[in-house]
Amino acid sequence: MLIATWNVNSILARVANVARWLDLVKPDVLCLQELKCADDKFPTEVFQERGYQCQIFGQPTYNGVAILTRGTCPTGHRGYPGDDETQQSRLIASTVNGINVVDVYVPNGQMVGSEKYAFKLEWLKRLREFFDVNYDNSTPVLLCGDFNVAPDERDVHDVRLWQGRILFSDPERAALQHVKDWGFTDAFRLHTEEGGHFSWWDYRAGMFRRNMGLRIDHIWISEALVQKNVRTWIDVEPRKWEKPSDHAPVIAEFDV
């Protein structure tokens, strides 16, 4: 079973690339972030033609998350319980083949010390509370998406450059670690210890060509899935295509 996550940086701009990638890789589940479109504008038919059902929590212009699955599966949470329609579309959950899949697009935070930065830290705090209330860490749970945080020094191309900056500041990393302490294991790090593997590269200054990126897109799994995780990797090929997202897909394979 293949479960993948990909920040597509506008599904309408990137639909051809996503369809191409689905035809090549054929994941059982694809979690998307940064849709930048409302539910009714989402290109559902393109994916249904390929055998995927779509659970969508969109938002015009910004944000938006979706889960694509082979066959039907129920939509669980759309945002945090209790949130109203004015809240940002950043979380969607479903259950696929017995696995509780939670797809998130963590706020970027813009700049350390800003209001958006404080919102990011609060959002991560709420994410931990969300798992505390709604899930049991002894069961199969998978959290994935664009976390907008590089967890450790191996996950940035230049530690001195990024130290204290947004995406790698100590408070962000601590907030993300608090989520991880719920009972998650970084599936990528189960199989790859060394640094230099990234999932996001700025469009500017030839950052992708020079492999000057960050690993901010993640798949985390509860203990019940650790032994079943055959491999987890970052697929950099779509980043080489015409009009790519600035993120690459991350894929986890499970023996289930």
Image (cartoon, helix red, strand yellow):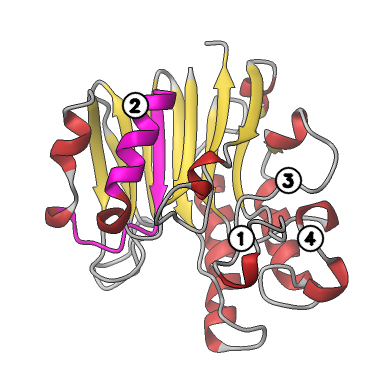
| Cα gap from disc 1 to disc 4, whole angstroms | 10 Å
Q: Which mark is residue 23?
A: 2
Q: Determine the residue positioned at 38% across, 41% down.
A: 93
Res 190 → quadrant: top right
Disc 4 secondary structure class: loop
Which residue corresponds to mark 3? Answer: 197
Location of mark 1 (residue): 201
Q: Amino acid at mark 1?
A: Trp
Q: Which residues are magenta?
A: 15-39
Neighbor class of circle 1 (other Cα within 10 Å; few <14, some 14-19, many 20+) is many
Viewer-proximal residue among 33 and 238: 238
CB-based contact (under 8 Å), mark 3 and mark 1: no
Residue type indicated by callout 3: His
Q: Using the image, determine if residue 88 lies above or below residue 75.
A: below
Dot label at residue 243: none
Residue 206, quarter of picture: bottom right
Q: Which residue is mark 4?
A: 157
From the viewer's perspective, is residue 18 above or below residue 168? above
At label 2, the amino acid type is Asp
The answer to which of 166 and 93 lies nearer the viewer is 166
In whole angstroms, how far apart are the C-alphas of marks 2 and 4?
A: 31 Å
- The answer to whether residue 186 shows anywhere in this view is no
